[in-house]
Image (spheres, grey):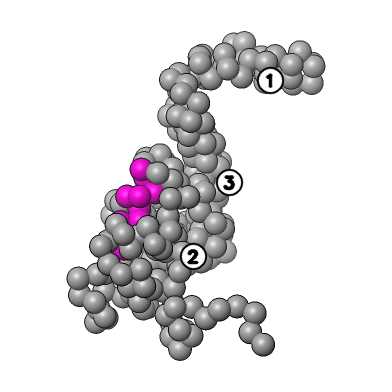
Amino acid sequence: MPTTSPSPKGDADRRSLWERIDPSAPSPRPSLTAERIGRTAIAVADAEGLDAITMRRLATELGVAPMAAYRYVDGKDELLQLMGDLVHDEIELPEAGVPWRETFRTIALRTRELRLRHRWLAALPPEAAVIPSPHRMAITERLMASLDGLLPGPDERMATARSLHAYVGGAINYEASLVMLMENRGWASGHEVRTALAPEMTYLMESGRYPSIRAWALGAARKDDPSWEFTFGLDSLLDGIAARHGI
């Protein structure tokens, strides 16, 4: 006996989301498109966060029947995949032929801007970041193509592209989380954050277990300059790639 309910769209169509919503395919409802669905959901998430996204809320925002969106996305999981892909179309990619370092640096900086505009990206479930999608693949394609002829083979080119994704994702997840915390708590500056978190930091610093962090806390001049910190880390990564491969 089945333990799960069939999707509203049914089980007959096993094509991927991207094939089903290909712009060249005929639309079952011309007034409603996958892009309109995704962009509407993105606007809700930008204003209220991912928790506000439901298929019923989406139908209300679109002014359609609750089941209408299921003709395009098979539930919330696919909707989140669509949203995550569409926002990456906002990244203007460097033209083909731009040197690898400029390509990597430009994409990293533009991705940071994107992730700070759409901070809910950090809260997407893992599958939304791992399942292939058109616009995210276009970014990786441009990164890898910029390394053609410079690295030994496709394994090295993919690993290098993923190292950039990993750095950007880790750095921005922390920065975006801090911004959201400040907004939630009503803190307007780094000084207010440190004042509010003083009990935790004081206890930990006085334990004597974190001398390097204590030295940073007492002497750092750029605590409230996340742009500088991101760029410094990025350039260090690119310097390492260049030195390792002599490029």
Tag 1 secondary structure: helix
Characterize the magenta stretch by its predominant secondary structure.
Answer: helix
Q: Amino acid at mark 1?
A: Glu
Q: Amino acid at mark 2?
A: Asp
**Quadrant of residue 28 within the rendered picture:** bottom left
Q: How many numbered marks have been drawn onto this rendered protein structure?
A: 3
The residue that mark 3 highlights is 244
How far is disc 2 from disc 1 in space, using C-alphas? 37 Å
Residue placed at 56% from the left, 58% from the top?
126
Res. 165 mark: none
Mark 2 vs mark 3: give the one in front.
2
How far is disc 2 from disc 3 in space, using C-alphas? 40 Å
User: What is the x, y in percent for residue 188?
Assistant: 43, 20
Residues packed near mark 1 inside 10 Å, few (<14), some (14 to 19) or many (20 plus): few
Left/right placement of residue 61 relative to residue 245 reads left
In magenta segment, residue 103: no
Is residue 149 visible in the rendered image? The answer is no
Tag 2 secondary structure: helix
Residues packed near mark 3 inside 10 Å, few (<14), some (14 to 19) or many (20 plus): few
Q: Nearer the viewer, residue 181 or 108?
A: 181
Residues packed near mark 2 inside 10 Å, few (<14), some (14 to 19) or many (20 plus): few
User: What is the x, y in percent for residue 77?
Assistant: 49, 65
Res. 200 mark: 1
Q: Nearer the viewer, residue 244 or 1?
A: 1
| Sequence-first disc among 3 and 1 | 1
Q: Amino acid at mark 3?
A: Arg
| Sequence-first disc among 2 and 1 | 2
Residue placed at 43% from the left, 50% from the top?
52
Give, as a single range, the part of the protein colored magenta: 35-47
Left/right placement of residue 80 relative to residue 130 reads left
The residue that mark 2 highlights is 77
| Sequence-first disc among 2 and 3 | 2
